[in-house]
Each structure stands twice: as structure tokens, then as C-alpha cells.
Amino acid sequence: MASWQFWALLSAAFAALTAIFAKVGVAGVAPDVATFVRTVVVLVLLALVLVATRQYPQLTALSPRTFAFLALSGLATGASWWCYFRALNLGDAARVAPLDKLSVVLVALFGVGFLGERLSMLNWLGIALIAAGAWFVTLRA
């Protein structure tokens, strides 16, 4: 298996493509319909992955706590996508996506506040720069 950095960078690349494809796809269609289509595609793709890799038996082995937190994560994902597609319908992808990435800043804050994670001063500087950069991209000069 590759490192977490590899997978994180690959995730970023796919997220960038998501913004571009979604911006084109949301043109002329209600954001809710676009979000629904995207969700169905993700569901079908992941179902195929589970079947192809024979991971589907793990679905019955989930503890109630694990299931509850994954369900909450799913609700948050759905809400995020719903808001994201509405934002893309109204704004430029080049401005919407960076502002959406303020989630990076919020993850750091929530990780420290709720999970007890620790960040160094250098890490906090990076978080501040991400926040500033995301905001600057939204501005029209």
C-alpha cells in the first residue's frame, strides 16, 4: 500500500476534477438533482468495489457505535454535497472550491477541540495560511 500522503494527494486531484465536472454538470439542472445523480454514481461505484474486493461481509460486522458515526459522517457528507452543488450553481468553480476547502481549517480546529489532537506552531501557521489563501481566492480584484 502507498503512503497516506499518496492517497491524500490523489484525493485532492479527484476533488479538483469533481469541482470542474460538477460545475459543467450543474449547468441547466437543479442543484438537488445534480447532487442526487452524483450520490447514486458514488453508491453504485462503491457497491461494485465492495463486491469486487469481497469486503461486503464486513457490513454485517459493524458495531452500533461504528455504524452510528459512519451514518453521521454520511449525513454530513450529504449536507456538504448539497451545499456545494448549490454554491457551484451560483458561483465560479475557481472561487467555490477554495472556500469549500476551509473544511481543512475546520478539521484542524475540530481535531484539536474534539479529538485531543495536537498541532505545532508551524502547523497552526499552515492552517492560517490555508484560511487566508482560501479567502483571497474568493475576492474579485
Image: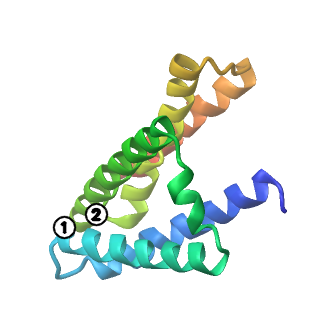
* Mark 2 lies on residue: 85
Residue located 32% across and 48% down the image: 75
Q: Secondary structure at mark 2?
A: helix
Q: Does 120 sit left or right of 41 as displayed? A: right
Cα gap from disc 1 to disc 2, whole angstroms: 8 Å
* Amino acid under disc 1: Asp
* Mark 1 lies on residue: 32
Which is nearer the eye, 45 or 131? 45
* Amino acid under disc 2: Phe
Contact check, label 1 and label 2, Cβ < 8 Å: yes
Asked if residue 65 is positioned above or below residue 99 in the image, the reply reads: above
Residue located 47% across and 32% down the image: 106
What x and y, as percent, mark residue 89?
23, 67
Indicate which disc, 1 or 2, sits on the residue closer to the N terminus: 1
Which is nearer the eye, 132 or 76? 76
What x and y, as percent, mark residue 140?
34, 52
